Image (cartoon, rainbow, N blue to C red):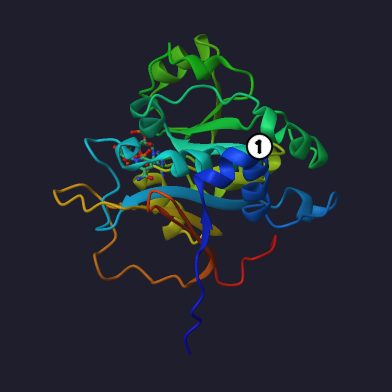
Amino acid sequence: MFHLQKATQVTSAESDQTGNDILLRLAEHYRYPPRPSEGPGAAAPFVRANMVASIDGAATHDGKSGGLGGDGDKTVFRVLRGLADVILVGAGTATTEGYRQPQPDEAFADLREENGQTPAPALALVSRSLSIPPDYPPLSHPDTVVLTCASAPADRRAALVDAGATLIDCGEDDVETSTLIETCGKRGRPRVLCEGGPSLLGSIIADDLLDELCLTTSPHLAGGRAGRIVTRTGDGEDTATLKGMSPAAIITDDDGYVFTRWLRHGRSSIH
Ligand SMILES: NC(=O)c1ccc[n+]([C@@H]2O[C@H](COP(=O)([O-])OP(=O)(O)OC[C@H]3O[C@@H](n4cnc5c(N)ncnc54)[C@H](OP(=O)(O)O)[C@@H]3O)[C@@H](O)[C@H]2O)c1
């Protein structure tokens, strides 16, 4: 009935001794499920989300998720980016949290080359309103896409295109979550890392498109009124269908952070 196992602990002493080895060990631990090099399975997206919450479920402190993070959390964040083809993020989160263009990380260069991946993950910004400042630097990078819908305001669309952005419509009146994810696969970026925020993750979960959740529990009680890692307007509080997840791993660090991986039932491989 019970499986009493000690969580794997990653200590700072270990990380001092082994330098990049700890990153590669974590990369092995967090690797995406293997995929065929050809055929339909090669482009099948696998959607992982990485989120942080306090023990009492707050997704932010002082309005940002960074307020809950620690050194271990930053390391896991770096490893997950090192493994991903694309970082899928709500435009609001990208601008609030000051996202920059992802850069190649030397620690994962060989691994990415072996996997046939580009040197750095691309950025995919999700927005219906397109109220992204046209001078937001990652917009004009050739690897960045803005995933929106046909009914997005035409003037904002024109302003972003003029600023060098690549816009892709993923629906008519709304951004359809399934089309978002399909688009990542079709663009050759099937290892999807969703970094939130809570609204985007809520849509992905509502459509049962999340394969894996990597959740950092920050060793703090936040109190207050901060929201959860998932918010979704429209769903009744108790009516959303529960989706079963299986624990895949638990890691702790010196500072008391707990890093869990949860797989959606039956999604431990590329589907
Ligand atoms: N704890 C964590 O791990 C974590 C992670 C990320 C963010 N956060 C925090 O969460 C807060 C932001 O929450 P949020 O829910 O507003 O973030 P969000 O999910 O990034 O939503 C922000 C914007 O993204 C776009 N968006 C999201 N889902 C969409 C969908 N299904 N279709 C079309 N557009 C969509 C919308 O842009 P438009 O309005 O332009 O249409 C929306 O306003 C910030 O305080 C951030 O720091 C916490």
> Can residue 210 be seen?
no
Q: Is residue 217 left or right of residue 102?
A: left
Eyeballing the image, is 251 above or below 87? below
Q: Is residue 198 left or right of residue 85?
A: left
Query: Secondary structure beneath disc 1?
Result: helix
Q: Quadrant of the C terminus?
A: bottom right
Task: Please state the horizontal and vertical placement of residue 140, each as a whole percent of the image.
Answer: 55, 15
Residue drawn at the location 42% of the way across and 59% of the way down:
206
Image quadrant of residue 64? top left
Eyeballing the image, is 259 above or below 199? below
> Can residue 138 be seen?
yes
The one of 102 and 10 positioned closer to us in this rendering: 10
Eyeballing the image, is 220 above or below 83? below
Which residue occupies the extreme left position in the image?
Answer: 224
Q: Amino acid at mark 1?
A: Asn
The one of 203 and 69 positioned closer to us in this rendering: 69
Circle 1 sits on which residue? 20
Residue drawn at the location 61% of the way across and 72% of the way down:
266
| Number of numbered markers | 1
Residue drawn at the location 42% of the way across and 42% of the way down:
174
The one of 80 and 140 positioned closer to us in this rendering: 80
Task: Please state the horizontal and vertical placement of residue 186, each as a whole percent of the image.
Answer: 69, 41
Task: Please state the horizontal and vertical placement of residue 205, each as a whole percent of the image.
Answer: 44, 58
Q: Quadrant of ligand 1?
A: top left
Task: Please state the horizontal and vertical placement of residue 217, each as a whole percent of the image.
Answer: 37, 54
Number of residues whose C-alpha sits closer than 10 Å to that of mark 1, classed few (under 14), some (14–19) or many (20 or more): some
Eyeballing the image, is 66 above or below 241? above
